[in-house]
Image: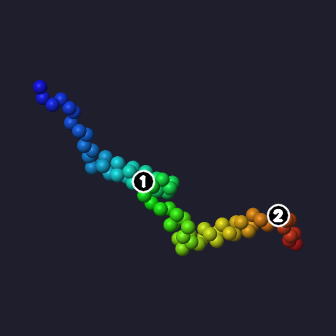
Amino acid sequence: EGDSSPDPWVPDAAERAMLREEFTSRMYQRFLDGEDGDFDYSQVDENPDLDNLDIVSRDAEERYFDEEEPSDAPQLE
């Protein structure tokens, strides 16, 4: 009696590329979700030098306008 185990599945080049893309996408999302236990996210989160200044400025502007009381616009003649 011979070995009756099935041949192992070997993906072709297209399948390997698709699997590599899926793996990369999942790992990228896992990192963004803060689920990478080997990475110290606090070094990035607490470093103001890494902040996107455009977003920080926009957030400050939105807070300013959110705090402003609404008023009627002046009438133009």
- On the question of residue 29 being in view, the answer is no
What is the number of the mark on residue 70?
2
Q: Is residue 48 left or right of residue 59?
A: left
Disc 1 is placed on an element classified as helix
Q: Mark 1 packing: few (<14 Cα in 10 Å), some, or many (20+)?
A: some
What is the number of the mark on residue 8?
none
Q: Position of residue 60 (x, y in %)?
A: 68, 69
State the quadrant of the N terminus: top left
What is the number of the mark on residue 27?
1
Nearest to viewer (mark 1 / mark 2): 1
Q: Position of residue 5 (x, y in %)?
A: 20, 32
Q: Three-letter amino acid code at disc 2?
A: Pro
Q: Position of residue 34 (x, y in %)?
A: 50, 55
- On the question of residue 48 being in view, the answer is yes
Q: Nearer the viewer, residue 15 or 50?
A: 50
* Residue placed furthest toward the bottom: 49
Whichever of callouts 1 and 2 sits on the residue coming sooner in the sequence is: 1
* Residue placed furthest toward the top: 1
